[in-house]
Image: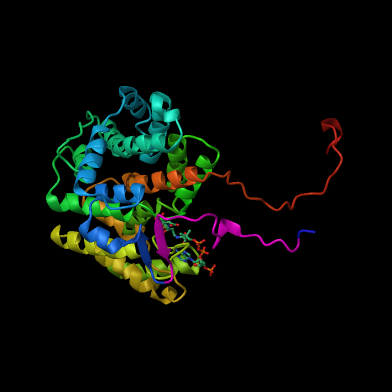
Amino acid sequence: MTDDVKINRGLKGIYFERSGVSLIDGAKGELLYRGYTIHDLAEHSTFEEVCYLLIHGELPTADELAAFDAELKAARHLPSQVHDIIFACKDGHPMDVLRTAVSALAALEDDSQTTGEEAFLRNGIRLTAQVPMIIAAHEAIRNGRDPVAPDPNLSHAANWLWMLKGEKPSEDAARLADVDLILHAEHGANASAFAARVTVGTEANLHGAIVTALSTLAGPAHGGAAEDVMKMVKEIGSPENAAAYVKAKRSNREAVTGFGHRVYRAEDPRARHMREGVRKLGEEMGAPEWYEILQGVVEAMKPYARHGLNVNVDFYSGVIYQLHGIPMDLYVPIFAIGRMPGWIVQCLEQQRSNILIRPLTLYNGPDVRPYVPVGQRG
Ligand SMILES: CC(=O)SCCNC(=O)CCNC(=O)[C@H](O)C(C)(C)COP(=O)(O)OP(=O)(O)OC[C@H]1O[C@@H](n2cnc3c(N)ncnc32)[C@H](O)[C@@H]1OP(=O)(O)O
Ligand SMILES: O=C([O-])CC(=O)C(=O)O
């Protein structure tokens, strides 16, 4: 009866909805946010401007940008109980701490239970401001320091670095962090955004959807890859070991982290900007070997490129964070800081024409059979 049913494992190549937010051309390796190429945005824009663009659909005028920026800055506040919760689980992975703190905010902030367009926008902006605060506060608390108060004179990216390190970042460091957030801001129906949409599909609130998204982003097949790339680079240790490393992985049919993508068959367009960042920063900081190890892996993976296997956005980002002295376990949380507007806009879109997302699994278990009482089994 069911032999002719086609199963799409992993929903590969399946369109489940229309979306006006981002266009990913996997064959050409192109990415547009609301019609603007990621290259133009990375070169000319700021994270605040990209947030506005993604959420409202158009680039802001100067007045609109100033108002949006003021709203984001005004939302830089965490209830004191969140610091207590962070303290209680300070030894956990920062991604678990972040997810727990966002979940706590759902219980602590009155507005979090409201759904609808306006509530999603208000809660979305507040969470966008709070997520970097939680990560920075955790980093301070686990190192026995007091969390650093946000600085209203700093942009989102610069303020994040300031709260993380307790020192004002250089212009170059702040710009690199800003570009990193822009590049991670949105990517269509990726696993975490899809998971968030499933949550909104049940008419749940935005905090719940963001908790779902954070849980999903954490895995090594998605946002967790940057941390794994850094572990790989350290394991390789020196550029001349890269080819042997790749050979061993491939002969065991194991994935080489930072390569491969569900949609891209050409190189992920975001990787170009990160590659340039690693090269430049490595040279400036007298540590060119990281870049050389990465390029050694790329060289060794070339035979697989013809099958569409190329670097993805996570391949270079970890080394940039490493060069900035950021601990490895913060790499996924940094991705989450950037991805906030993408998750918010995906949730807004889902809510606007909401439908319960509920596919089918094709049953392949036993036929109907009689129940046997426990004493008669075995
Ligand atoms: C921000 C992001 O989420 S980007 C992705 C970050 N994740 C990673 O970097 C982890 C490593 N990459 C992977 O695990 C995968 O490429 C994924 C999960 C991202 C995508 O997987 P899928 O779309 O399911 O690709 P799929 O598994 O169909 O791969 C197709 C072929 O390429 C191979 N392949 C895919 N990724 C890799 C890789 N990283 N290294 C080596 N081979 C790979 C597969 O083994 C498969 O080969 P086969 O046809 O001979 O079996
Ligand atoms: O689109 C995907 O499947 C994963 C990805 O690159 C992202 O979320 O940025």
Task: Give the quadrant of the N terminus.
Answer: bottom right
In front of the other: 86 or 254: 86
From the viewer's perspective, tell me whether residue 166 is left or right of residue 11.
left
Along the viewing direction, whichever of 187 and 141 lies nearer the viewer: 187
- Residue 271 horizontal/vertical position (percent): 32, 63
Q: Is residue 351 above or below residue 266?
A: above
Q: Which residues are magenta?
A: 3-27
Q: Residue at left 48%, top 63%?
A: 254
Q: Is residue 15 magenta?
A: yes
Q: Position of residue 194 (x, y in %)?
A: 49, 49
Q: Residue at x 58, y 46 (%)?
A: 357
Horizontally, is 72 left or right of 201 in the view? left
Q: As drawn, is 262 to the left or to the right of 32?
A: right
Q: Residue at x 15, y 53 (%)?
A: 172
In this rendering, the count of numbered labels is 0
**Image quarter of residue 82:** top left
Residue 101, how many percent across, how many down? 38, 32
Q: Position of residue 67 (x, y in %)?
A: 23, 40
Taking depth in this image into account, of 284 and 361 the one nearest to the observer is 361
Q: Is residue 116 visible?
A: yes
Residue 281 is covered by the magenta coloring? no
Q: Main secondary structure of the magenta part?
A: loop
Q: Residue at x 28, y 35 (%)?
A: 133
Residue 237 appears in the rendering? no
Above or below: residue 23 compared with residue 159: below
Q: How is the image coloured?
A: rainbow
In this rendering, position of residue 9 left or right of residue 68: right
Q: Quadrant location of the C terminus?
A: top right
Could you say which is closer to the camera, residue 116 or residue 289?
Answer: 116
> In the picture shown, does residue 307 fall above or below 91?
below
